[in-house]
Amino acid sequence: MKRILLAAMLGWLSIFASGCAVSSGQESSSQYVDDATITARVKSRFAEDKTVAATRISVETLKGVVQLSGFATSEAERQRAAQIAASVPGVKSVQNAVQVRAPQS
């Protein structure tokens, strides 16, 4: 009985240690965690920066590639968001789809 229990535990351990895919084989669980960490760091740096409105710019990361979307009030804010994202460790590239739109009253 102990051998069966031990074999079952080792089987489960090998499944979890092998890096099961998170979403349809696109990312391993460790890559997903790395991407989530990158996204959190970019958002945090946006919140700390006085020139970037963190609430208007969305951040998504897939395999180290950061995708920015949303709206900026100036080209300078749009470019600053990309600079901040590119400076985060682990970022391979930044795709900046932020659109410049005049502030609404």
Image: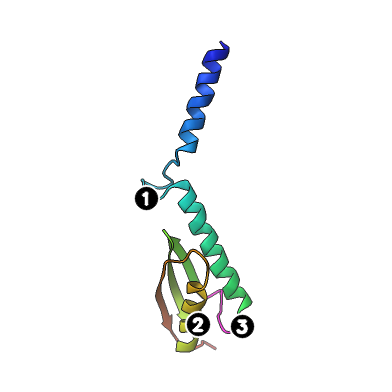
Query: Which image quadrant: the N terminus?
Result: top right
Q: Picture coordinates of residue 86 (x, y %)?
A: 47, 73
- The stretch drawn in magenta includes residue 15: no
Q: Amino acid at mark 1?
A: Gln
* Residue at the disc numbered 3: 50
Which residues fall within the magenta stretch? Answer: 50-56
For the residues labelled 3 and 2, the Cα–Cα distance comes to: 10 Å
For the residues labelled 3 and 1, the Cα–Cα distance comes to: 35 Å
Q: Picture coordinates of residue 80 (x, y %)?
A: 50, 82
Report if residue 74 is visible in the image: no
Residue located at (48% from left, 26% from top)? 11
As helix, strand or loop, the secondary structure at mark 2 comes to helix
Q: Which numbered disc, 2 or 1, marks the residue that appears first in the sequence?
A: 1
* Residue at the disc numbered 2: 80
For residue 104, above or below residue 26: below
Residue furthest to the left = 25
- The stretch drawn in magenta includes residue 51: yes
* Residue at the disc numbered 1: 26
Mark 3 neighbour class, 10 Å CA radius: few under 14, some 14 to 19, many 20 or more: few
Q: Are marks 3 and 2 in contact (CB under 8 Å)?
A: no
Q: Amino acid at mark 3?
A: Lys
For residue 18, above or below residue 6: below
Query: Which image quadrant: the C terminus?
Result: bottom right
Image side of residue 1 versus residue 14, left or right: right
How many numbered marks appear?
3
As helix, strand or loop, the secondary structure at mark 1 comes to loop
Residue located at (57% from left, 84% from top)? 51
As helix, strand or loop, the secondary structure at mark 3 comes to loop
